Image (cartoon, grey):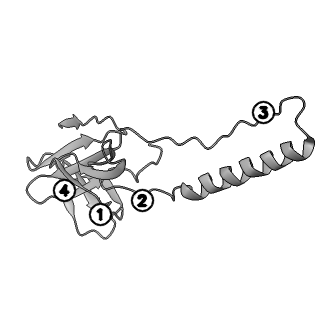
Amino acid sequence: TRTTTTTTTTTTPTTSTAIAAKTSSGVPTSQAANRGQSEAQSQNATQQQFPPQAEEPQLPPGWTKCLDEASGRTYYMDMEQWKSYWTAPTYQHLYFSRRSDQQGRAYWVDQQGNAVIYEDDPDWTRRADNQGQLYWSCASTGYRFFEQPPNSQG
């Protein structure tokens, strides 16, 4: 069984919305309160400009999220084919289970019993993504599947 590990370093942008408010002695309370309201409004405006990001979609096996440092935009990279895209690929996990045939050869079958993949098939390679998730990939068909549901515990 061959296992290949792909490692990628990604950079994530950070945004600071904290505003420090200082009140010096001699400033009337009303001015300090107005200043505090202005700062709160400024902080609210900053938070409105950078809303919290929605839950990230699950990427297919072999894909990673990257940051284009020049533009600050997120892009998605297929690490096996070395192709990048601005939009995230869609992925729906199919459940596979590992079994053995009468000769003791290990294979994987999908939940519907349609796909049968033998581990000793030379077209298939066992890989690990940059988060350590194990998956199988067939270079000739482009088909890939995770051994376990993404982000699950062994």
What residue is at 82 percent from the left and 49 percent from the top?
34
> Tag 3: residue type?
Lys
Residue 22: image tag? 3
Q: How far apart are the two marked residues, 3 and 1, measured between alpha carbons? A: 62 Å
Residue 22: image location, x then y, percent: 78, 33
Pointer 1 residue: 110
Image quarter hosting the C terminus:
top left
What residue is at 40 percent from the left and 57 percent from the top?
58
Q: How far apart are the two marked residues, 2 and 1, measured between alpha carbons? A: 22 Å
Toward which corner of the image does residue 28 lie, by quadrant? top right
Residue 75: image tag? none
Kind of element beneath mark 4 = strand
Q: How far apart are the two marked residues, 3 and 4, measured between alpha carbons? A: 66 Å
Pointer 4 residue: 117
Pointer 2 residue: 57
Q: In the figure, 35 relative to 3: above or below?
A: below
